[in-house]
Amino acid sequence: MSNIGSYEERIRDFSWSISEKELGYNPGGIINIGWLCSDRICELGKAQKTGLIWENASGVVKKFTYNDIRLASNTIGQFLRDLGIKPEDRICLFMDKIPELYLGFLGILKIGAIAQPLFSAFGDESLFIRLENAWTRAIITQKKHLPKIRKILDKMPFLEFIIIVDQDPLKPLQSREIAFDLKNIPKVEVFEICPTRAESPSVLHYTSGTTGQPKGVKHVHYSIISQYLTSKWVLDLQDDDIYWCTADPGWVTGTSYGIIGAFSNGVTQCVLDAGFSAESWYRFIEKYRITMWYSAPTAIRSLMKAGDEIINKFDLSSLRHLASVGEPLNPEAVIWSEKVFGKPFLDTYWQTETGSIMISNYPGMKIKPGSMGKPFPGITATVVSPDTYESFDVPGKIGLIALKPGWPSMMRMYWNNEETYKNKFRNGWYLPGDRSSIDTDGYFWFVGRDDDVINTGGHLVSPFEVESALLEHPAVAESAVVSKPDFVNMEVVKAFVSLKPGYQPSKELDLEIMNFVRKKLSPLAMPQEIEFMDSLPKTRSGKIMRRILHAREWGEEVGDTSTLEDDDK
Amino acid sequence: MEDMKEVIRQYVINEYVEDDSEIQNDTPLISGGIVDSFSMVSLKRFLENKYHISIPDEKATPEAFDTVDKIVDLIQEYIKG
């Protein structure tokens, strides 16, 4: 029996108080995610239950009971507090998927500071932009990432502490660096948790938009009300589950469902800190008898690409429930997973700003392969006209996805960016920036983004950021960045570049520019293809017409070109 | 062959390794998280430029790129072919 039971009955009887009561939260009282995910689970009698099993690429395994998680998060919290870290200070987590990332996240929340997780593959420029925007006071990292931080340190007087969790004792520390070794520090048994309230800030995740710099999405401790219940009803987390969320906590799925949802439900979760290969993933499922697997369409399509033969080498019979997030899950992937795993991946739809699943397929509900499913109970979702922002009442008609604000995990602001935040709301709706239709049965069908943001492998990349980075390369005169279709990643980054006098297109320059962007921003943002042009298509006023290049990549009609410079027609 | 391995190994160290981690010819690059799937595209481009070959996308799998040894095996197929 699934946790959600009847979707229709849940819709009819729904109130967020269901989640509040299960988590023991009294409106107006104290609510702290760090405590709810560790101390509370211990108080429920699960102190000795394994909460986290971690394995790295070399096969090293570490296991943590819920009591270990409680003590470790206390210890990290105390360490930060002793440094003088105060509630609402921003503390960046810049690490691979190592245990300190998960434990540090809870420790930061326990002292009322704001956790700012950042993807550890970010280059120095991406890192700097986000730290500067948040005026981050401390960063917790690994020695392998120090070169990137040291490179930008002079530009960051606000960054007081660089906390290294695996410092080699024989190597000297540099300015502002502090070593912290969780293994060898006395554990803090009794710890005073910061009495955070519903609206106390908790997490600051960064996401990309079409224009401007990345936006810091602020969430609050009350978000756990959504994250707990969606984990329970959509991911169907049950007490004896062995759960694997493949997302990196540098992104919102990795915190909402890779930390908060998992630990607040008291399940055992597994983390594989290694790169992707079909064999290592199947081996991981077999080894730990994974029952619930939450992954991404890009990974699923990569597994499809690896073929079905490899699956027969492993016993994957432990899998009982599969779900997917990050980008639309194509029907072929749903049908394939039914064929090879005996059950479909259920698509879930949400984004950094929503903090938790908004529209989804549910255990026990009829699945229409390729559909996003239906709104989570308590979520009012529709599609609206892009002109009037009025809700459509026409099945199959494409419009903007619109959500009625007010669910617990809704973002509370974009950090230092009130204007962009306000622009996300129209006619009483929150607009995530995606287009879809709704069929006669109430299922949503994803169509695409409503802007130029590139969704590659489930991660959003701003064309503006990549274009800006390209312009910093000495050979590049002009740049335009669009998405191009890709079987595995749905979309990848493609750059159009014109060169400065004295430079000629070549394979070597092509690779040099690719690597330049990769190191500056991130591998995700690296153009997978660069096309050199004599000049880029522009309006008569000189604005580059990205739209024309995008249409060309997707085989679409170019549309109105009346404003195009004559030479470009 | 050994020269080729050394060229590729050095390229991986210079381009993808952030600290002083040692990379051997059998060190897992992709499954070991040293080179991610996006960065693999730039590694493939380097190999194609350097050895004047074209590796079909379907052959450029995470498994085929997982170690310097395996990459060299793959390249040999196309140099000979």
Image (cartoon, grey):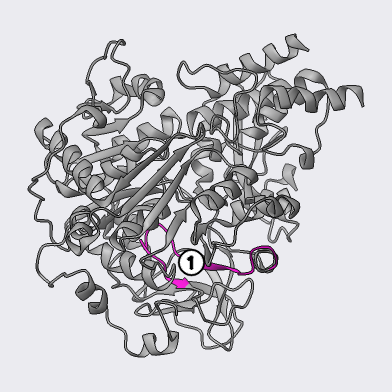
Instruction: State the quadrant of the N terminus of chain A.
Output: bottom left
- From the viewer's side, name the closer residue of A175 and A144: A144
Tell me the SS state at disc 1.
strand
Residue A329 to residue A49: above or below: below
Left or right of B75? Residue A93 is left
Name the residue nearer the viewer: A194 or A404. Answer: A194
Residue extent of the magenta highlight: A339-359
**Residue A555, position as x, y percentages in the image:** 76, 57
Q: Mark 1 is on which residue type?
A: Tyr
Q: Residue at x 27, y 63 (%)?
A: A224
> Is A343 contained in the magenta span?
yes
Q: State the residue position of label 1.
A: A349
At 17% across and 38% down in the image, what residue appears? A75
Residue B26 lies, with reference to residue A203, above or below; the image says: above
Q: Could you tell whether B80 is left or right of A318 in the image? A: right
Q: Residue at x 40, y 67 (%)?
A: A237
Question: In this view of the protein, which residue sits in the foreground, A506 or A520?
Answer: A520
- One can see residue A453 in this view: no
Name above or below for residue B72 compared with residue A418.
above
Q: Is residue A400 visible?
A: yes
Residue occupying image coordinates x 23% and y 54%? A47
Task: Determine the image quadrant of residue A124.
Answer: top left
Whether the magenta-drawn stretch holds residue A505 is answered as no
**Residue with the most extreme right position:** B81
Locate residue A503, reporting x and y percent.
68, 19
Question: Where is residue A176 shown, x and y percent of the image?
Answer: 22, 20
Q: Toward which corner of the image does residue A28 lie, by quadrant? A: bottom left
Drawn side of residue B80 relative to residue B13, left or right:
right
For mark 1, does the 10 Å Cα neighbourhood hold few (<14), some (14 to 19), or many (20 or more) residues?
many
The subunit letter for the residue under badge 1 reads A
Question: What is the tally of numbered marks visible in this picture?
Answer: 1
Q: In this rendered view, identify the residue nearer to me: A201 or A283.
A: A283
